[in-house]
Amino acid sequence: MPGQPAVLTDERDQLLAFIAQQRDGLRHAAYGLGDAQARLAPTAGVLSVGGLIVHVTEMERGWVDLILCQPQQGGQDDYVDGFRLAEDRTLAEALEELDRVAERTEQVVRAIDDLNQAVPVPKGVPWYPQDLDAWTVRWVLLHLIEEIGRHAGHADIVRESIDGATMFELMAGAEGWPATEWLTPWTPETQDART
């Protein structure tokens, strides 16, 4: 069924499928946007579709680094900058980087024998629990589903604020669904008709 991950019997495959589905939500929110539109922050906050893609890419990379016990990079300025699509980057480049991180996530997760493998909790980070020594890889994957899904929802709201396009019509346009009485896939022509 379009818009839903396949029903799989392997837990690892199912978790990776749900993560991929949430990433697709970001891609669909960006569908048809130019670079300048991807930088727009049309709501009361500072979030843009392009900035959310940049953030999710770095956030996912960071969680996979934690699984691999690799040190975290960057500081507060990097965190703030990580929510914007810089002027010297294109939306296409940001989406390509999201794809590279997705491939790395899949490779790392598939190479792990046990989803109960411990993932040490970094100390001194205010949003991490200080009374817990480790998560599991399974927990990290479930957290990635939640975190990417949260930001895909943000991207939906930002996109709708830019031009009125909503998730299902964007998904239908991106995936080439036929028009029905319920849904007209988004195209530049349907957008032009709105404005």
Image: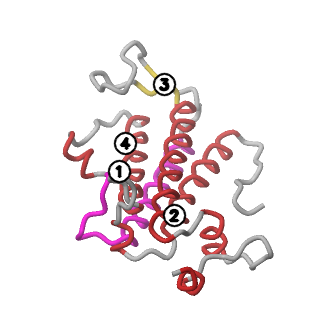
Spatial CA distance of label 3 from label 1 is: 32 Å
User: Is residue 67 shown left or right of residue 89?
Assistant: right
Residues at discs 3 and 1 in contact (Cβ within 8 Å): no
Instruction: State how far apart marks 2 and 4 are (Cα).
Output: 29 Å
Q: In this view, does 144 lie to the left or right of 171?
A: left
Q: What element carries label 4?
A: helix
Residue 80, placed above or below residue 53: above
SS for callout 3: strand
Instruction: Write down the residue under mark 1.
Output: 45
Say which residue appears at 43% left-offset and 42% top-offset. Answer: 64
Q: What residue type is labelled 3?
A: Trp
Q: Mark 3 highlights which residue?
A: 135
| Amino acid bearing label 1 | Gly
Image vertical order of residue 53 relative to residue 126, above or below:
below
Task: For mark 2, give the secondary structure.
Answer: helix
How many neighbours does mark 2 have within 10 angstroms: few (below 14), some (14-19), or many (20 or more)?
some
Q: Nearer the viewer, mark 2 or mark 4?
A: 2
Looking at the image, which residue is at 35% across and 58% down? 51
The disc label shown at residue 160, or none: 2
Rounded to the nearest angstrom, the CA distance separating label 3 from label 2 is 36 Å
The disc, 4 or 1, on the residue closer to the chain's N-terminal end is 1
Q: Earlier in the sequence, mark 2 or mark 4?
A: 4
In the image, taking residue 121 as reference, residue 159 lies left or right, namely right
What's the CA distance linking mark 4 and mark 1? Answer: 24 Å
Q: Distance between the residues labelled 2 and 1?
A: 14 Å
Q: Of marks 4 and 3, which one's residue comes earlier in the chain?
A: 4
Q: Which residue lies furthest to the front in this view?
A: 195
Dot 3 or dot 1, earlier in sequence: 1
Residue at position x 28%, y 37% in the image:
72
Magenta stretch bounds? 83-111
* Residue found at x 28% / y 69%: 89
